Amino acid sequence: MLVSRFISRFSRNSLKRYRSLVCCQPDQLPVLSNCCYSIHFTDRVQGNQETNCLGSRAIHGIRYQVHHERSSIIEMDPFSLVADELSIIANSLQEMVVAEVPKLASAAEYFFKMGVEGKRFRPTVLLLMATALNIPIPKSTSDGVIDTLSDELRKRQQRIAEITEMIHVASLLHDDVLDDAETRRGIGSLNVVMGNKLSVLAGDFLLSRACVALASLKNTEVVSLLATVVEHLVTGETMQMTTTCEQRCSLEYYLQKTYYKTASLISNSCKAIALLGGQTAEVSLLAYDYGRNMGLAYQLVDDVLDFTGTSASLGKGSLSDIRHGIVTAPILFAIEEFPQLRVVVDRGFEDPADVDLALDYLGRSRGIQRARELASEHANRAVAAIDSLPESDDEDVKRSRQALVDLTQMVLSRTK
């Protein structure tokens, strides 16, 4: 009923304007104004603080051009490089979520079944990172002679990919309950099919299985990293639910929340891959930097697609964030151009007419373009992290590093 009321109020001209933005390629984005903004946000990981300053000058400059020239032509599908291992991981995940209670088992495996398992984006990144880091390990960081990519090491790194995917799916199950979602990955969300209670329990069950698998690695630093990820997921969701009016309109707050909800998982998992391989602190930090910036770019594009995509293409409802009163980067940038939009945002979008008004402001602003440009900036930083890894003449290492670079372009150009 709410959806039909909203659609009836929605301006057709505005919708046409938003949909056209999704076809805009990164090299066609308009130039930002010369006024520059500065965003400072802090990644709090393991007690350390890393502060970043992002400039909003046009990403069509030298750094973007280098990245675009390298990445626009993807010679090999990154997913195909690890296809065999992804199949092994898929089978392993199905075995790991077996439960004694049939209903719980059905719920836990709901998004691990063939056809609805998703893109397996995170396991792909982690497997590629494992090969990309197959470099000689300095003796000072090793207790003995380590085969850089032994079967045992690879299995342990595969286990990180499995744990990461279980944590990710558990967070989706919980998010769908909190958001009253109706669809996920093109099918009915678990909370709709089996109810909220079973959906929450299935998410809890996946987290418990992830903890058991994590403990089997017997690496306290890796355990601590991924335990922190779960804490970040809860913190990010709480930040989203309990924002003040000032926080909702803060780009710094939005980016910190986005790190907790999305980027922490992939960044700390990439770091865990490096730690299991016995890499130095410097190399582990580069792996982390790649994951953090890739995660932020991914979510920024996701927030753009929430406005420009369709429910069919996304596998979930479009415009879901704004209809739930969640303010994301495109709207935040639009507020900078149209300060009067702030009054609409402060009302919380409970009135469908306010949603329509906000979308009208967004369509007249450069909010979509600027969100894409910020995503490109983070993609460039992810590429820079890969470029900074120690040199290697190994062809598999080179191929995997190029695949990680190519993935950044795939994230920027995706439509679902």
Image (cartoon, rainbow, N blue to C red):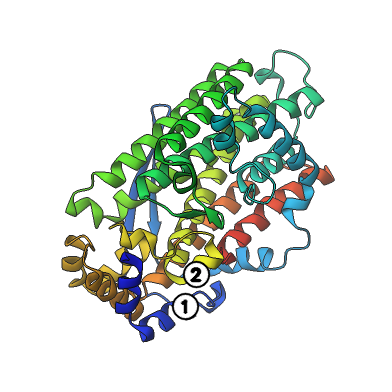
Picture quadrant of residue 150? top right
Taking the spot 32% from the left edge, 58% from the top edge, the residue there is 38
Taking the spot 61% from the left edge, 63% from the top edge, the residue there is 67
Q: Residue 310: which disc?
A: 2
Q: The C terminus lies in which quarter of the figure? A: bottom right
Q: Secondary structure at mark 2?
A: loop
Residue extending farthest bottom = 13
Q: Residue 362: which disc?
A: none
- Residue assigned mark 1: 19
Q: Nearer the viewer, residue 291 or 394?
A: 291
As displayed, is residue 331 above or below residue 128? below
Taking the spot 35% from the left edge, 78% from the top edge, the residue there is 363
Picture quadrant of residue 230? top left
| One can see residue 63 in this view | no
Residue 236 appears at what percent x and percent y?
36, 41
Residue 172 appears at what percent x and percent y?
48, 44
Contact flag, marks 1 and 2 (Cβ < 8 Å): yes
- Mark closer to the chain start, 1 or 2: 1
Whole-number angstrom distance, CA of label 1 to CA of label 2: 9 Å
Mark 2, other Cα within 10 Å: few <14 / some 14–19 / many ≥20:
some
Q: Amino acid at mark 2?
A: Thr
Q: Nearer the viewer, residue 352 or 145?
A: 352
| One can see residue 188 in this view | yes
Q: Amino acid at mark 1?
A: Arg
